[in-house]
Image (spheres, helix red, strand yellow):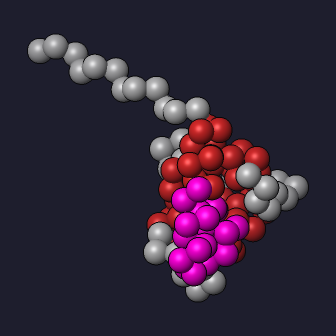
Amino acid sequence: VPAAPPAPPAPPRKLVMAECEAEAKGDAAKGFCTLTQALAVRLALRFESRPKDILVSMCEAGLPAAKDQRSTVKAIMRLCHPDKCKHPEAKRAMQILGPLLS
């Protein structure tokens, strides 16, 4: 049985971030949530398979950063919480961010 072809390399983080920002602007224009909330949701979804890049990308995008990872994750989770953010993927973003608390 031939080996499976290698997975294509992940696109550069800056490109993914630019795509997320464009999508977030569209989400905010639709009135789902603020641009900041939409950006947090979009970045969490896009970097789900690369958890170590989630927080770095969010900080580079200007989202809240705190003195430690746990505090930073909690601040970003407040942005994405479905009670405060009406983005259709807010709940999924919370599920992705939850494991980063530990």
| Residue 80 picture quarter | bottom right
Q: Which residue range is magenta in the image? A: 22-41
Nearest the viewer among 102 and 14 is 14
Q: Looking at the picture, how far across and down is residue 49, in whole percent?
A: 48, 44
- At horizontal 71% and vertical 45% (from top left) the residue drawn is 56
Nearest the viewer among 80 and 98 is 80
- At horizontal 63% and vertical 42% (from top left) the residue drawn is 53
Q: Residue furthest right?
A: 67
Which corner quadrant holds the C terminus?
bottom right
User: In the rendered image of this protein, does residue 2 appear above or below residue 19?
Assistant: above
Q: Looking at the picture, how far across and down is residue 78, in whole percent?
A: 69, 74
> Can residue 16 be seen in the rendering of this structure?
yes
User: In the rendered image of this protein, does residue 78 appear above or below residue 52?
Assistant: below
Indicate yes or no whether the magenta region holds residue 51: no
Our reading of the magenta stretch's main secondary structure is helix
Q: Looking at the picture, how far across and down is residue 88, in whole percent?
A: 46, 75
